[in-house]
Amino acid sequence: MASISGAIRLVREEVNQDAVEPLELDRLVRDIEVEMVSLGHAVTIDHLDRVSVKAGALGLRRALRNLIVNAATHGKSCTVALAGGTARRSSPSPTAARHPAGPAEQGLRALLPG
């Protein structure tokens, strides 16, 4: 849990320096999946809703990539799903494993607007 807290702190520091912009979260996840597969990680996509968020691109990409790498490495494989909220103030709900949301997914949710 300490490594997740440290990663969240690092990303928050980067986000403070990173320009906030609209990002297509589903596209970012697909790009990371392609990169991870090319590096030999067992990463697959389950279902990705089209979701846009306002965030720092560098910080969010680094956080997602780290969570997916950790899930693929320590869990031997990783399946990523993304469900977007339908209400105006709903946050996306990321899942990067085949188990109920653990500390990694909860950490990512803390980074997303809500």
Image: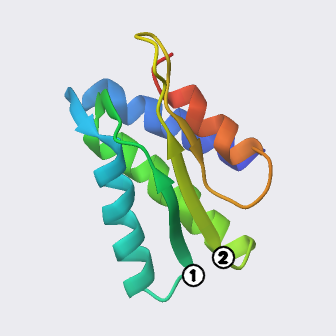
Q: Secondary structure at mark 1?
A: loop
Indicate the position of residue 50 as horizontal and vertical percent values: 34, 41
In the rendered image, the vertical position of residue 54 relative to residue 48, given as above or below: above
Report the disc number at residue 77. 2
The residue shown at (38%, 42%) is 60
- Left or right: 94 with respect to 53? right
Image coordinates of residue 21 in percent, x first then y, are 19, 28
Give above or below for 79 relative to 95: below
The residue positioned 49% from the left and 31% from the top of the image is: 92
Front residue of 43/50: it is 50
Q: CA distance from mark 1 to mark 2?
A: 5 Å
- Residue 102: image x %, image y %? 77, 45
Q: Which SS class for mark 2?
A: loop
Dot 1 or dot 2, earlier in sequence: 1
Give the image location of residue 20, x and y in percent.
23, 25
Q: Is residue 100 left or right of residue 4?
A: right
Q: Residues within 10 Å of mark 2 (few under 14, many from 20)?
A: some
Report the amino acid beneath label 2.
Answer: Ser
Q: Is residue 30 above or below residue 74?
A: above
Please, what is the three-letter code of the amino acid marked with disc 1? Ala
Q: Quadrant of residue 24?
A: top left
Q: Which residue is mark 1?
A: 42
Q: Foreground: 33 or 104? A: 33
Query: Which residue does the image show at 80% across and 47% down from the upper left?
Result: 100
What quarter of the picture does the N terminus occupy?
Answer: top right
**Residue at the spot x=43%, y=82% of the render?**
37
Task: Name the one closer to the observer, 95 or 4.
Answer: 95
